[in-house]
Amino acid sequence: MTEETFDVVVIGAGPVGENAADRAVRGGLKTALVEHERFGGECSYWACIPSKALLRPGNALAAARRLPGVPVGGALDPAKVFERRDYFTSRGDDSGQVEWARGAGIEVVRGHARITGEREVTVDAERVLRANHAIVVCTGSVPRTPDIPGLGEIPVWGSREATSASEVPARLAVLGGGVVGVEMAQAWARLGSQVDLIVSGPRPLPRYPEFAGDLVVEGLRADGVRVHLDSGLVRASEVDGAAKLELTGGETLTADKLLVATGRRPTTDDIGLEAVGLKPGSTLTVDDTGLVSEVEGGWLYAAGDVTGRAPLTHQGKYAARAVGDVIAARAAGEVVTGETWSQYTSTADHHAVPQVVFTDPEVASVGLPGPEEGKPHRVVDIDIAVAGSSLHADGYTGKARIVVDTEREVLVGVTFVGQDVSDLLHAATIAIVGEVPLRRLWHAVPAFPTISEVWLRLLETYGL
């Protein structure tokens, strides 16, 4: 067994781990980055990138159809959609990501990493990596599988299969009304599947304002998706190679594939947490500097989905940048206090987490979805009905919400739903992070004619 010493060892080479390692190296620390699958991680090959590559052609085609005079074809060409997706995922070849890591000065280590002691990682039971300063866990998350009778007997997709498949199933059932469920339901419907979406509540996207889920359901149904609300999967069985699905209330569906999209859990089952007194499979609780609170000694850090804080790629990368900077600063003898909004803290996790659901219509949200009980909050809801939206698409339908702290007169939440509203989101994020007073925001004049005119209408409706 060989032994090597580094300043920092990062476990997991997805976007989060890459950022943590890169910032540690920039801080002058010798850093190893360990990965047992592909460098670039879930987002690059099975999640964010391929899912958006599948969604974009359908969204573009639908947008073109909303403009008279634009020549459009009748349907998508699945083979070309898959080919473009495969281009963006490098067809599973991670050599480009490895080359980037080495070019950044990071030691690339392939293999399965386990924490085997304080500041010690063992890779494939044959290579021991010792860390002078810190180990950082960035192993992400995996799908959570519900305990449903017969589920193991039928043809099932997880999120990876749903984003990497290259054949269109004639009949696809989707279990789950979260982001993955609604995005993949629409993507595969537009590629030619007959899709049934099974949602446990009265609408999908329950963490968003009600109008978001309602408008997304309208969009799904317009694409032929059969949406089963207040439903659930009671039992599954295999019949002639297909899945027979018994739903709440007695309804029965038959599908060639069932996509299970019922949430995710931290990937911490087999990384050696028991060696430091933690339970395998558990979420790693961290402070705002990324330090794992339950392990003494100040050497174990985590970022991304494993922390359960803000399970989004961009937020994980943000947290990882802070973690890498924190480790470098502490290694240099600096006292890092965790002051809010400093380069060493993930303060935005608590106040301004932006997210886009890339359905048609899109849902773009940051901060609070609605008022918090007992807080001085006021909600303003309006239709997105401005000159810019009318020109953008015939029959443009959308809604906007702001949540205002009326004592400070600053925004604490913004939600947009409509075609192409993701382009409005960063302005909202800046307004919340910067705590821009509404009376100052009033002077940020939106260009005419753009969908951004909705900002003026929101502030006018508030009373400015």
Image (spheres, helix red, strand yellow):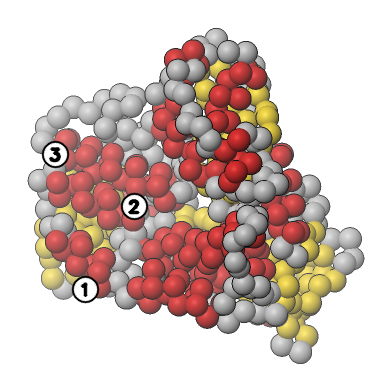
Circle 3: residue type: Ala
Where residue 253 sits, quadrant-wise, is bottom right
**Horizontal relation, residue 139 to residue 34: left or right:** right
Q: Does residue 172 appear anywhere in the picture?
A: yes
Circle 2: residue type: Val
Residue where numbered disc 2 is placed: 16
Instruction: Assign a secondary structure to mark 2.
Output: helix
Instruction: Assign a secondary structure to mark 3.
Output: helix
Q: Nearer the viewer, mark 1 or mark 2?
A: 2
In the rendered image, the vertical position of residue 406 relative to residue 98, given as above or below: above
Q: Does residue 212 appear anywhere in the picture?
A: no
Where residue 451 sits, quadrant-wise, is top right
What is the x, y in percent for residue 72? 60, 68
Q: Residue pushed farthest bottom?
A: 240
Where residue 11 sits, quadrant-wise, is bottom left
| 231 and 79: which is toward the camera | 79
Instruction: Assign a secondary structure to mark 1.
Output: loop
Of the 4 image quadrants, the one containing the C terminus is top right
Mark 3 and mark 1: Cα distance apart in space = 28 Å
Residue drawn at point x = 63 percent, y = 41 percent: 390
Residue where numbered disc 1 is placed: 126
In the rendered image, the vertical position of residue 218 relative to residue 429, given as above or below: below
Nearer the N terminus, badge 1 or badge 2?
2
Residue where numbered disc 3 is placed: 331
- Mark on residue 232? none
How dense is the environment of label 2, judged by Cα within 10 Å: few (below 14), some, or many (20 and up)? many
What is the x, y in percent for residue 409? 52, 13
What is the x, y in percent for residue 231? 80, 57
Nearer the N terminus, badge 2 or badge 3?
2
| 289 and 401: which is toward the camera | 401
How dense is the environment of label 1, judged by Cα within 10 Å: few (below 14), some, or many (20 and up)? few
